Image (cartoon, rainbow, N blue to C red):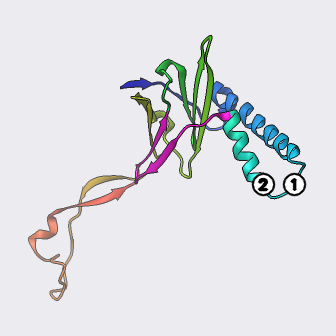
C-alpha cells in the first residue's frame, strides 16, 4: 500500500490549488465539448444529458468510483489501474475532493479527473489517501461532529418513592455518558 499525499485546501482558497484549477479548466472544456456535440447533432433538443456525459468521458476520462459514508466519515474508492502513486494528486477542501491522475510518457498520454462534492463539511486536514493494487482509497472524516464525553451525574434532593427510575437508590451515582460538543 502506498500513501498518497493529500493537498489540504482552505475554504475559499480552491483557486490557489493546482488540482482545483486544472479541474476547473477541464470543466470548461466539458461544457464546450458538450455544446460541440449538440451542434454536431444539428441542435436537436432532448439529448443534452447524453451530450454532457459523452463530453465528460472524453475530457475527464473514465474511472469507476464508489462513495460511501457512515456516521463519521466518507469513504471513496477510485479504480486507477495503470497509474503509479507519483502520477496521482488528491486535493481536499471543505466540501469537495478532486482526484487527478496523469501519465505523460512517450508512447502513453492519459489524464483522468474525478470530483466528489459532498453534502457535509469534511475535516480536510485529516483526509488520507492510499493506493493498493490499482485502487485509490480515500478516507475523509466529517467535520463538526459531537464528541461523546463521560460525565458523572448524581441525583440531589429527595426522590418520589413512587419513582421507578431508581434515583432514590445508591445506583443513582453510576456514571452516565452524556454527549458534549467540543
How many labels sit on residues? Answer: 2
Most foreground residue, 51 or 145: 51
The percent position of residue 96, horizontal first and vertical second, equals 58, 41
Q: Which residues are magenta?
A: 60-79
Considering every residue shown, the one lying at the far left of the view is 170
Residue 7 lies in the magenta stretch? no
Left or right of 63 in this view: 158: left
Residue under circle 1? 44
Mark number for residue 121? none
State the SS at label 1.
loop
Considering every residue shown, the one lying at the far bottom of the view is 162
Most foreground residue, 85 or 75: 85
Residue 95's image quarter?
A: top right
Residue 78 lies in the magenta stretch? yes
State the SS at label 2.
loop
Q: Residue at x 55, y 26 (%)?
A: 89
* Residue at mark 1 to residue at mark 2: CA–CA distance: 8 Å
In the rendered view, tell whether residue 175 sits above or below residue 72. Answer: below
Quadrant where the image shows the N terminus:
top left
Q: Residue at x 32, y 53 (%)?
A: 148
The percent position of residue 133, horizontal first and vertical second, equals 39, 29
The percent position of residue 101, horizontal first and vertical second, equals 57, 26
Magenta-colored segment: predominant secondary structure: strand
Q: Are marks 1 and 2 in contact (CB under 8 Å)?
A: yes
Q: Visible in this render: residue 144?
A: no
Q: Residue at x 85, y 57 (%)?
A: 45
Residue under circle 2? 47
Amino acid at each position: 500500500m502506498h500513501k498518497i499525499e493529500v493537498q489540504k485546501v482552505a475554504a475559499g482558497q480552491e483557486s490557489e490549488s493546482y488540482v482545483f484549477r486544472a479541474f476547473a479548466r477541464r470543466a470548461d472544456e466539458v461544457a464546450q465539448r458538450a455544446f460541440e456535440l449538440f451542434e454536431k447533432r444539428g441542435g436537436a433538443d432532448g439529448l443534452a444529458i447524453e451530450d454532457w456525459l459523452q463530453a465528460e468521458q472524453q475530457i475527464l476520462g473514465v474511472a469507476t468510483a464508489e462513495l460511501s459514508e457512515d456516521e463519521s466519515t466518507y469513504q471513496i474508492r477510485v479504480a486507477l489501474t495503470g497509474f503509479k502513486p507519483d502520477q496521482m494528486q488528491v486535493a481536499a477542501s471543505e466540501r469537495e475532493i478532486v482526484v487527478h491522475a496523469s501519465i505523460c510518457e512517450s508512447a502513453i498520454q492519459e489524464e483522468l479527473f474525478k470530483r466528489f462534492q459532498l453534502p457535509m463539511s469534511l475535516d480536510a486536514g485529516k483526509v488520507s489517501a492510499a493506493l493498493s493494487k490499482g485502487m485509490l482509497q480515500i478516507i475523509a472524516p466529517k467535520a463538526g461532529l459531537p464528541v461523546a464525553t463521560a460525565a458523572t451525574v448524581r441525583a440531589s434532593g429527595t426522590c418520589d418513592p413512587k419513582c421507578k427510575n431508581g434515583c432514590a437508590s445508591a445506583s443513582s451515582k453510576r456514571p452516565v455518558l452524556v454527549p458534549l460538543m467540543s
